Image: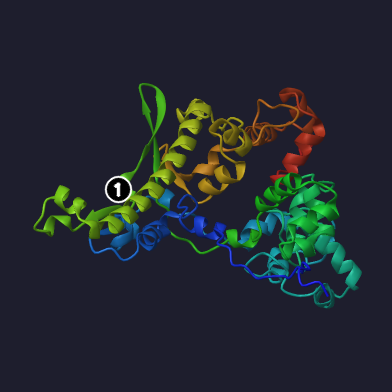
């Protein structure tokens, strides 16, 4: 035997790796305002000299009679939200009461909006076969908003949203249908080989999946007061956003109680880690406000006429367009304003109110603007064809939006 023979053996090795979750924990952009003070305090840690103070609305008792009525969102009841939709849902609307009611169908939903029982159980309640019950469920999945309701699980919920968005043949769809096991196990390299594409394409497809709502039913939650972070004011005829500092957390220090000047304190080595942690937290908080203000500045530019009251509806503004203008991802724009409220027209409204996609046939008109036109012309007795001729829109497009809004068909339609 040769004593100098090379032998290869496996050897365990520990390698430090930065977990993305650690970075996410210090990202304050996606934290709701009511949780912002607590999250800042968590990042700051145990610090005897600095601490965060919640805003006045959060640290004191609120007299509900003194609150702006617009700052208290109307109760979101999923039955009320789906009442008209289920009553007009094709196939389901043919069922006799109470099986065609929102109360009946919403009783089968859990907090996430998923089905809490099987199709067989629903079939027994209605008195039909399982296949027929599945037909009713499929009809609801393809009709009601928000998309993803009445899914049996997370996977089906995401697939419904992709299909409703016209992405059934996309790579994201293939990942959820053919590579779901690899996805859940985090085996992205195996997933890339199975999908026959590179990792960049996989990441783009996963980014699309991340933008979907995994819990469409959670939008219907308990009522709480909403406080705006940004206000749009009109200065010299131009809308300008500003931070409402009184509604935001502030930082306080106890350095004034020390028998040393501020410069002397900062020269002490023992205070260096405490001061560094404080600066780190303040920088993260500043990054949140900077991003929100950049989005608000873009809103004030695109929606200038709407903010000045010269238009009744918003102009087309999508998350993708905002992302390109601000050099952010569309997901970041969407998530950052998802729970952010602002002040405009002396009312408290969600910032996402200012976003609406343009129409493929009329990119200069937003969906909200189109629906406002349809409502107005429908009230005047115009049928779908007449409305389409007036606004240069296909009749089928007008009919689709009219049905979505639950408007009656004009007599001569």
Q: Label 1: how many residues lie within 10 Å, few (<14), some (14-19) or many (20+)?
A: few
Would you identify the image quadrant in which residue 79 lies? Answer: bottom right
In which quadrant will I find the N terminus? bottom right
Look at 49% across and 37% down and name the residue there.
295
**Residue 182 x/y as whole percent:** 78, 62
Task: Work out whether residue 314 or residue 199 is closer to the camera in this orientation and state it.
Answer: 199
Task: Work out whether residue 381 or residue 254 is closer to the camera in this orientation and state it.
Answer: 254
Would you identify the image quadrant in which residue 219 lies? Answer: bottom right
Farthest residue to the left: give it: 259
Q: Secondary structure at mark 1?
A: helix
**Residue 192 x/y as whole percent:** 79, 52
Task: Work out whether residue 324 or residue 202 is closer to the camera in this orientation and state it.
Answer: 202
Q: Is residue 75 left or right of residue 279?
A: right
**Residue 328 x/y as whole percent:** 56, 38
Residue placed under numbered mark 1 in the picture: 246
Its colouring scheme is rainbow
Q: Is residue 279 left or right of residue 395?
A: left
Vertical comparison of 266 with 217: above or below: above
Vertical comparison of 324 with 353: above or below: above
């Amino acid at each position: 035997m040769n004593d100098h023979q090379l032998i290869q053996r496996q050897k365990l090795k520990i390698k430090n790796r930065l977990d993305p979750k650690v970075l996410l924990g210090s990202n304050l952009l996606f934290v709701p305002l009511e949780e912002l003070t607590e999250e800042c305090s968590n990042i700051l840690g145990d610090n005897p000299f600095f601490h965060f103070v919640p805003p006045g609305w959060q640290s004191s008792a609120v007299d509900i009679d003194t609150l702006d009525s617009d700052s208290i969102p109307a109760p979101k009841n999923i039955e009320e939200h789906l009442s008209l939709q289920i009553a007009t849902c094709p196939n389901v609307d043919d069922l006799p009461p109470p099986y065609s009611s929102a109360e009946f169908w919403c009783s089968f939903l859990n907090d996430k909006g998923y089905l809490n029982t099987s199709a067989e159980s629903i079939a027994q309640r209605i008195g039909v076969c399982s296949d027929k019950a599945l037909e009713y469920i499929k009809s609801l999945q393809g009709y009601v908003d928000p998309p993803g309701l009445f899914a049996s699980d997370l996977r089906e919920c995401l697939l419904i949203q992709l299909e409703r968005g016209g992405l059934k043949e996309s790579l994201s769809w293939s990942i959820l249908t053919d590579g779901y096991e690899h996805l859940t196990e985090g085996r992205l390299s195996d997933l890339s080989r199975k999908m026959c594409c590179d990792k960049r394409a996989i990441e783009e497809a996963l980014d699309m999946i991340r933008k979907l709502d995994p819990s469409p039913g959670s939008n219907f939650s308990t009522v709480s007061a909403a406080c705006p972070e940004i206000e749009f004011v009109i200065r010299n005829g131009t809308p300008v956003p500003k931070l409402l500092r009184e509604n935001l957390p502030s930082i306080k220090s106890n350095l004034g109680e020390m028998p040393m000047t501020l410069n002397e304190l900062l020269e002490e080595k023992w205070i260096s880690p405490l001061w560094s942690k404080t600066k780190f937290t303040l920088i993260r908080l500043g990054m949140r406000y900077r991003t929100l203000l950049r989005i608000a500045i873009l809103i004030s530019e695109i929606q200038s006429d709407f903010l000045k009251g010269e238009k009744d509806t918003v102009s087309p503004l999508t998350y993708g367009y905002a992302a390109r203008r601000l050099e952010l991802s569309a997901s970041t724009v969407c998530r950052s304003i998802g729970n952010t409220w602002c002040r405009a027209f002396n009312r408290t409204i969600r910032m996402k109110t200012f976003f609406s996609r343009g129409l493929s046939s009329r990119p200069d008109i937003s969906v909200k603007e189109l629906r406002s036109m349809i409502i107005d012309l429908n009230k005047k007795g115009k049928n779908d064809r007449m409305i389409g001729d007036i606004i240069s829109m296909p009749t089928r497009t007008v009919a689709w939006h009219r049905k979505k809004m639950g408007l009656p068909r004009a007599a001569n339609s």
